[in-house]
Amino acid sequence: MKRIILFLMLVPCFCLSQMKTGTFSDLETLMEKDPKPVIIHLYTYWCSVCKMEKIALNNDREITDLINANFYLINFEAEKTKETIKFQGKEFGYIPNGNSGIHELALALSKNKDHPVYPLWIVLDKDQKLVYYHEGLWIPENMKQKLLEISAL
């Protein structure tokens, strides 16, 4: 009976696909070995749209396989990440504001410098030049279509 319960608890884990994610510190080394377009996904822990989007994307095997095969993905929590990040030759730090704060890199990547919109998706080509920018919910079907276009470049 215990084995059946354990099996039933693990079944959802096998059904969900997992996107491989990296960090900004790994990116430079990865790009030297195997240049690929980069997807930077900015989100916050409190964003309900971010949570819904994450579930939808992790349940879409085609998107997961597409991203894992053709892109580097960096998930970046814009308001909880406090370490200094070196990106494109510059250093970015955390800006505290009372009990909260925001990372300078989130502000640098966002077109809305006062109040970034989450989730925020930024796609860079192999040379780390901006090829796509998307604020708010990115519907899986639209994401799939755009990423297929970008991976074909």
Image (cartoon, grey):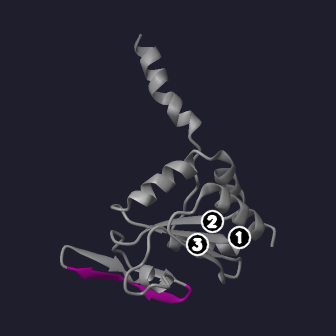
Q: Provide the residue designation for mark 2.
A: 72
Indicate the amino acid at tag 1: Lys
Q: Is residue 152 left or right of residue 40?
A: right
Image point (50%, 85%), residue name? 111
- Mark 1 neighbour class, 10 Å CA radius: few under 14, some 14 to 19, many 20 or more: some
Rendering coords of residue 142 (x, y %): 66, 61
Give the mark nearer the N terminus: 3 vs 2.
3
- Mark 3 neighbour class, 10 Å CA radius: few under 14, some 14 to 19, many 20 or more: some
Quadrant the N terminus occupies = top left
Q: Which secondary structure type mostly characterizes the magenta part of the structure?
A: strand
Rendering coords of residue 34 (x, y %): 72, 69
Label 2 element class? strand
In the image, the segment drawn in magenta is: 88-97
- Mark 2 neighbour class, 10 Å CA radius: few under 14, some 14 to 19, many 20 or more: many
Tell me the distance, in whole angstroms, between the alpha carbons under discs 2 and 1: 7 Å
Rendering coords of residue 2 (x, y %): 40, 14
Closer to the eye: label 1 or 3: 1
Q: Provide the residue designation for mark 3.
A: 27
**Residue extending furthest toward the top:** 1
Image point (38%, 65%), residue name? 44
Give the mark nearer the N terminus: 2 vs 1.
1
Indicate the amino acid at tag 3: Leu
